[in-house]
Image (tube, grey):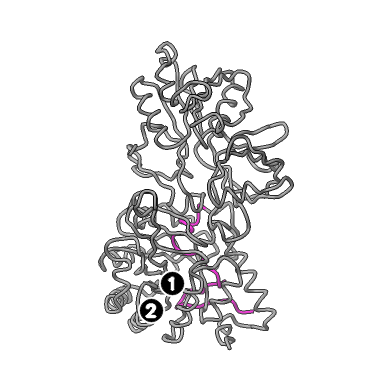
Amino acid sequence: MKQFLARVLENPVIAKDYRELFLSWPSEVRVPAPGQILSVRVNAATVPFLRRPFAVASFDRRERVASIIYHVRGPGTEILAGVQAGQQLDILGPRGFFFRDPPRPEAVLVGGGVGTGPIVYAANSLAEKGFSPLLVVGYRGQELAPRLRLNPAVTLQLCTDDGSAGFSGTVVEFLKTLSSGLTDKAFVWACGPQPMLKAVHLWTRSREVPCWVSLEEIMACGVGACMGCTVETTDERRVVRVCTEGPVLASEAVKWT
Amino acid sequence: MDLTLRLRELTLAGPVGVASGTFGYAKEYEALVDFSRIGAVYTKAVTPEPRLGNPSPRLVETASGMLNSIGLANVGVEAFIRDKMPFLRSLPSAVIVNVAGAVNEDYEAVLEALEGVEGVGGYEINVSCPNVKHGGMALGTDPRLVADLTRSLRSRTKRPLILKLSPNVTDIGATAEAAEAEGADAVSCINTLVGMVIDIRARKPVLPLGTGGLSGPAILPIAVAAVYKVSRRIKIPVIGIGGITRWQDAVQHLLAGAKGVQVGSGTFANPRLAEEVHDGIVAWCREAGVLKLADVAGLLG
């Protein structure tokens, strides 16, 4: 982890209220792994007071360009939405436990809302390693579904709650349609709103599919010092920091509430 | 220029410390800061036994600040000595252990466990945490209880004792006087203020315990006023803490009467805040013709 300034290359709208911010990645900073987070200071003022954590959504090794996908929904992301190409952003990262060591041959990746970014990065990374991931992403409606840049080996399954595009229903309703021939050989990586993650976790339990989830929690320091971003676990650790032991955790280790 | 602050045998080489709870056990910031310009590291609060802390969410951002309800999550004194002290004692900064507990016996137990431990420069006694049911702030809001605890700890150590004062009182000067009368070497002033944020959709407080401790630039004027009041009531040094996000804020604390400062939650946005404040204070003193940091308090008109 380092603190560094990164130049903004682009900051386009990719769906209603969603943007993707592209950053020039300094050569001295380690390549971020799928699931890892960047803690971004959106301005030099004291409002907003805290940095904002975002998971990496893509990394272009040749051009050394990283991106994050964010939902414009509060004072921090509203300022971020106004950031122009050429500006520098103060970044801490990359940080945290990431998606790693796929245990089975078939990858089923599940994303929803702001959880889309890290899951797309994970899907593209697996595709580069020879996997043919099934990427299941869910939104309330088509207008919220971002344009995604996917490796050709990734199969995309869009789900919408209102049936305006793709599968009509939630990501979990779609997962229930998968054959046991696939799920018996599959693992799941998921990122999205907590209710979605819990539903995905329960489905993977019913099918005995190993599952890892990336959690979101408000953070203050983002470096493991403040103990603010903790979640409870079912294992002997009992409490872990999302910024350090997470954000990616085995779903069975999470104490779902 | 003399930037030092002497507390018994301990000399703080620089005027800026990093506040307890905002800097972990220092190792977390190893890759990000230059410790040579951090006068003192005030550790995460240490209790006799490990504590997991409060339920999530533990944080909520506010206008120019934040509320926290961490609940003194820490590894406990035994693991602190074994796992955290080796790195801490390797630092050029003074190491001041923040001691917390529910009853006097807890504070005594932590202090006694640390007494023989090399590298511990002094103790900051946390009688002002707003996020625990017993001890903490309940203790720190009653000057008689502060006096009892200070007396008991004074009899157990020759190392510097710094009492960390709660602002959630009617007369903060009375608590400071109680600490001074029983042999405290300094007070740090102030801990967080009790605050609440309500989620109007859920119609309940965002923090599970209802309230949390408010910090950040929102509390700077409250902290400066507290330092001003307290430093006129006691002779022992006041260490100013609260709301510092720029060196100018720290100079306000010094002019109000503080002999040193701590930066707290401002570090979250700017990990190098302590160093920047150190440099700013040095430059300001040079420009003002100040030869000794302790003289700054006398400059207030």
| Residue drawn at the location 36% of the way across and 44% of the way down | A239
Q: Quadrant of residue A232?
A: top left
Determine whether, in the image, residue A221 is placed left or right of residue B210: right
Q: Circle 2 — which element?
A: helix
Q: Which residue is at the front of the view, B167 or A161?
A: A161
- Write the start and end of the magenta stretch as one range: B1-28
Q: Is residue B214 above or below residue A58?
A: below
Q: Name the spot of residue B11 as percent of width and height, x first.
A: 51, 74
Q: Which three-letter amino acid code belongs to the residue tagged 1?
A: Ile
Which quadrant does the C terminus of chain B fall into? bottom right
User: Which one is nearer the viewer's eye here, A78 or B136?
Assistant: A78
**Residue reaching furthest top?**
A181
- Check residue B18 for magenta coloring: yes
- Give the residue at mark 2: B172
Task: Please identify the dominant SS of the magenta region.
Answer: loop
- Residue B190 bears which disc, if any? 1
**Residue B42 x/y as whole percent:** 46, 64
Q: Residue at x 40, y 71 (%)?
A: B164
Residue B26 picture location, percent across and down: 50, 57
Name the residue rendered at 53%, 30% in the picture: A119
Measured as percent of width and height from the top left, residue B259 is found at 52, 78
Q: Is residue A185 magenta?
A: no
The chain letter for the residue carrying disc 1 is B
Q: Quadrant of the N terminus of chain B?
A: bottom right
Give the chain letter at badge 2: B
Residue drawn at the location 52% of the way across and 37% of the way down: A114
Q: Which mark is residue A161?
A: none
Q: CA distance from mark 2 to mark 1?
A: 9 Å
